[in-house]
Image (spheres, helix red, strand yellow):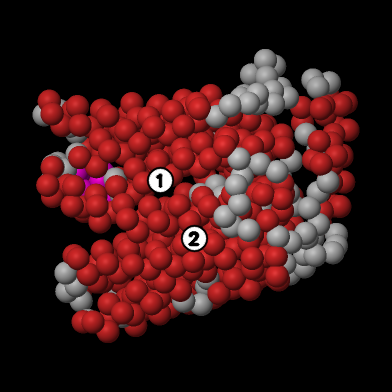
Amino acid sequence: MARRSLGRQFGWLWTSYAVSAYGSGLGFGALPLIAVLVLHASAVQVSALSAVGPAVGALIALPLGPWVEFRHKRPVMITMDLARFAVMMTIPIAYALGRLSFVQLMVVSAVTAAAKIAFTAAGGAYLKTLVQPEDLLVANARFESTTWSSIAVGPPLGGAAIGLFGPVTTVVADALSYVFSALAVATIRGREQPPRRTGRRRVRVGELLDGWRHLLAHPGLRALYLNHLLVSGLIMATEPLLAVLLLRRLGFPPWQYGLAFAAPCVGGLIGSRLASRVVARYGQHRVLRTVGTLRAVWLIGLAFVQPGVVGLATVIAVEFAIIISMSLYNPVLATYRLERIPDDRVVRTLSAWSISSNAAIAILSALGGLLADVTSPRTAITLAGLLIFASPLLLPRRPDSPPTPDLAVATGPQAAGDAPEAEQGHRLLAEVGHEATARPGPEPSVGPGSGGRHGD
């Protein structure tokens, strides 16, 4: 089931994703590294680069959601890839000319973050036009496995390349990967369905929040959305704390630190390949509840890490358990998400999800850093491990049924036209639609037919 062909056009989209994912893997942590090695930035500056850049990028991406929604997705994806290539190539050029600055790194970080959100949201909408509904989960699992394999392979190779060829080497490789990604997207053949509102007047202010309205109006999506913000924020907030604990407090050498995060990524390949079969056997809702709960039980183990081989084995075991749970859960989450987003709101909803996720990670990381400064990294990791135990309470308690295609069309704002009366009528239809999807129903269809694009 996981190895069947999904068609040549999906193959090119997967190639685009894989090329950029491995390029990002090679360039993992490149900007903070350049800030430290080339610009001799302080710890505060490096923290600002890691938090402020993506946060500003999320703000830039806010108006892009409605703009992308009503345009052909393939040209948007190509444009976002080329924009990332152009802005990243300014770094090696400025480095060669001796003009590289910290402000430039901040700008590059913000622009690439905004372009990534727009590309991912457009790709999620475009995927629904390339594969059949029964193949979405298989496609989603393949993206997930590619993500984890790029994380396992990319950073060690990138570190070796920096040691051999200099600090901006991986930036060049990452930038070029976006060119090849754009070429792969451009190779996709077939006529894309015209956006329903192309050529209409400019985006209205109210449409900027449509993604959040849909997420919060649907009971199941709302629960999974809030759960995701808490879990991803707490897990990512422990990463810099764990780095300080392992490298500074416990004296782990850098190669052991890298091994502790690269080796567990094998779990990502295992979990993503099991996703279709597990859903086919147990059902979508049961997998979301069970695996979503399992994601939360492992993090506390990082608070008990000790020096030496035992401590290294502890980190690898805990990270392996977290990653295998996440890689199994993520495709199923994306499945549920896309099934319940009307076609005319996919980009805005996925953009809202990504923007909120970035904001939650930035806020919780900042709070974790402040707590670690006042107490200790181990104390902050312990608190995160305890708080995440509450996250399963946010998971949906009862299954619901995916909306029918007719309902998805009926809730689209483009059907309302420009008349206020028509808009009011379709808002009423949208409310009825949300009530219908909120009612208890039978278990959703299982197997690969319940899949969807993984956005983050």
User: Bounds of the magenta span?
Assistant: 29-35
Depth check, front residue: 128 or 95:
128
Q: Residue 275's quadrant in the figure? A: bottom right
Please give the residue where the numbered disc 1 appears in the rendered image: 21
- Name the residue that disc number 2 marks: 232
Mainly helix, strand or loop, the magenta region? helix
Residue 34 magenta-highlighted:
yes
Residue 240 position in % (x across, y down): 31, 62
Q: Is residue 276 above or below residue 12?
A: below
**Relative to residue 13, is residue 445 depicted above or below?**
below
x and y, in percent, of residue 394 in the image: 64, 67
Q: Position of residue 86 (x, y in %)?
A: 33, 26
Q: From the image, which quarter does the N terminus lie in?
A: bottom right
Tag 2: residue type? Ser
Residue at 38% from the left image edge and 68% from the top image edge: 264
Is residue 204 visible in the rendered structure shown here? Answer: no
Q: Amino acid at mark 1?
A: Ala
Q: Is residue 83 magenta?
A: no
- Circle 1 crowding by C-alpha within 10 Å: few under 14, some 14–19, many from 20: many
Q: Residue at x 29, y 73 (%)?
A: 376
Query: Which residue corresponds to the image point at 67% horizontal and 15% vertical from the top-left?
Result: 199
